[in-house]
Each structure stands twice: as C-alpha cells, then as structure tokens.
Image (cartoon, rainbow, N blue to C red):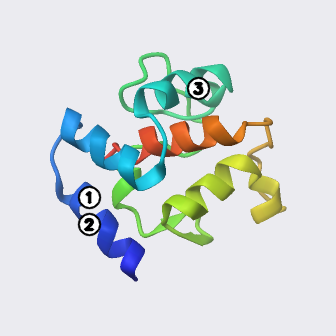
Amino acid sequence: MRRLLLLLPLALAGACSDRDADRAAQLTGGDPARGKEALRTYGCVSCHTIPGVREADARVGPPLDHLAGRVYLAGVLENSPENLARWIKDPPGVDPKTAMPNVGVTDEDVRDITSYLYTLK
C-alpha cells in the first residue's frame, strides 16, 4: 500500500516534466533519459506503443501509456518499481504464458527503463 501511495503523485501530475523525471529517478534509481534510449536498444518499440518514443507505435503488446497510474502490471503484479523491474528483467519468469520474451536487459538498463516508464502518466 505504501508503494502505491508513493506512486500517487506521479499518477496525478500532468505531462512529463523535469520534476516528473526527477521523481521517477528517485523512485527507481534509474535515469529516464537513458531508459528512453534503452527501450529502442532492446526492441521494446517493435511491440509496444510508448509515448515520447517516436518510432514506438506497434500494437503487438499493450500500449505503455499511463503506466505510472496503473494498479497492476501485466495483469498479474501490483504496480511498484520493484515489480516493474522484475517484469522487464524476466517476463516469462513472472508469467510463463506471456508472449513477452526475456531479451536480456541488464540491471542498470532495467532501472533506467523502469524510470522512464514511471514518467508516463
């Protein structure tokens, strides 16, 4: 519950700003700017629509808009930075039936991607 309360300011804030990026970085320990680039590097853009990432307009996986304000991740995890990082690191380890592959995201890149996704309200 405490984690959800920590996310509430992110969910209620407006468009992504420097303040939002700072809050996301504090919450996750990552860098949102590097996370945005990592989404391209790992091919996330080929399956997801991701706001703020120009070429990310695919519809294989769910859109990642408003991720910071969601209650659940992937329909199976409570939305928290730890759970989002766990999902990004090894989706089949969380849900063996998922179509999302384990693409070998490094721990640092997981933190950065998580940070960027938490700027999305």
Q: Amino acid at mark 3?
A: Ala
Residue that numbered label 1 is attached to = 11
Q: Is residue 26 above or below residue 19?
A: below
Distance from label 3 to label 2 (Cα)? 25 Å
The amino acid on which the numbered mark 1 sits, given as a three-letter code, is: Ala
Q: Earlier in the sequence, mark 3 or mark 2?
A: 2
In this picture, is 61 found above or below 78?
above
Q: Label 3: which residue? A: 38
Query: Looking at the image, which is closer to me, 105 or 49?
Result: 105
Mark 1 and mark 2 in contact (Cβ < 8 Å)?
yes
- Between tags 3 and 1, which lies in front? 3
Q: Quickly name the residue at label 2.
A: 8
The structure residue drawn at horizontal position 62% and vertical position 31%, both measured from the top left corner, is 44
How packed is label 2: few (under 14 Cα within 10 Å), some, or many (20 or more)?
A: some
Q: Earlier in the sequence, mark 3 or mark 1?
A: 1
Q: Tell me the amino acid under the disc marked 2.
A: Leu
